[in-house]
Image: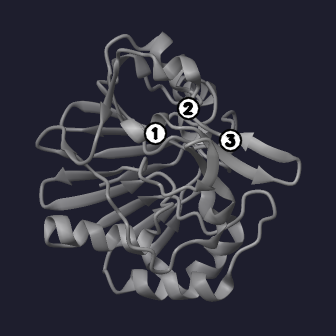
Amino acid sequence: MLIQNLIENSCKIEGLVPEHGLSFYVKLNGKKVLFDTGASERFIQNARKLGIDLSQVEILIISHGHYDHTGGIEAFMECNQKADIYMQKAAAGEFYSIRETGNAYIGVPEEVKKSKRIHFLEGDVIIDENLSLFTGVTERKLWPKSNTSLKEKHEGKLVQDAFTHEQNLKITYGEKEILMSGCGHSGIVNIMEKYQQLYGRYPDVVIGGFHLTNPRSGEMDKELVEQIGRKLLTYGADYYTCHCTGEEAFVFLKQIMGEKLHGISTGEKIII
């Protein structure tokens, strides 16, 4: 099984381009899956340079309705005419980031919301024997404070984003179970606990961002990050993180979690 990052915030491979966004390519049992599309068409450029033909992708999963995970959907649909696209219905809402320069819209492009190729889901879905999606992470233990600037429009007013539009991917590969989470806005600890409630065990491998750093200020809550790191160790999984975890938070987590934590950047592979 291959999981390859097509774009995230950093890059160590010459010729590829990073951006504040996230996209992974997954290949298992002959199936080709895309998880998120970054903030632009740049993930497609990287895929071509890596020898990956995105026109053959059969399934696109959108983790949540923010621009850095959905900005490349239109470009993807232009180069791929067949993939089924799975997104929570709530991901078509109106989302904003509160910034010093004003309220910035960070939601899904309006044209994308009209596409008939998208399966707008309402809750958990089993796609096939290898792929399942789950939502409904409502617990707020060890919840990233960097979420507080993220809002959604409800009845004409901006309120705290409840992240009901966030969905997580469970991959079953033989005896291994893999959890993929876009940003972990609901809190990676809460997502892990929800996984255990649903499936009776914790995943073997966890891949995605943990949203531990404010993307503009770079600030993190060191005490909270330490608590999260120590809690993650108790689950026994191997973790591959990137994007919104933040460089400083990753370095600090690495001191706590050691060989259980790995960083992954643009173009890098995970072989399972």
Rendered location of residue 108, percent (x, y): 56, 32
Q: Position of residue 163 (x, y in %)?
A: 47, 55
Label 1 residue SS: helix
Q: Is residue 220 left or right of residue 59?
A: right
Question: In terms of depth relative to the viewer, which is nearer, 140 or 234?
Answer: 140
Q: Residues within 10 Å of mark 2 (few under 14, many from 20)?
A: many
Left or right, 195 with reference to 55: left
Q: Nearer the viewer, mark 1 or mark 3?
A: 1
Identify the residue at image location x=37%, y=36%: 89
N-terminal of the pair, mark 1 or mark 2, is 1
Q: Which mark is residue 18?
A: 3
Q: Which picture quadrant has residue 84?
A: top left
Q: Amino acid at mark 1?
A: Ala
56, 133: nearer the viewer: 133
The answer to the question of whether label 1 and label 2 lie on touching residues, with beta carbons closer than 8 A, is yes
Query: Three-letter amino acid code at disc 3?
Result: Pro
At label 3, counting other C-alpha atoms closer than 10 Å, the crowd grade (few under 14, some 14-19, many 20 or more) is many
For label 2, the SS is loop
In the picture, the disc for residue 91 is: 1
Residue at 28% over, 58% down: 178
Instruction: Left or right? Give the position of 253 relative to 79.
Output: right
**Residue lying farthest to the front in this orientation:** 155
Residue at horizontal 12 percent and vertical 61 percent from the top: 175
List x then y, in percent, for residue 230: 46, 88
Q: What separation in Å lies between label 1 and label 2 (alpha carbons)?
A: 7 Å
Dot 2 amino acid type:
Val
Per the image, label 3 sits on a secondary structure element best described as loop
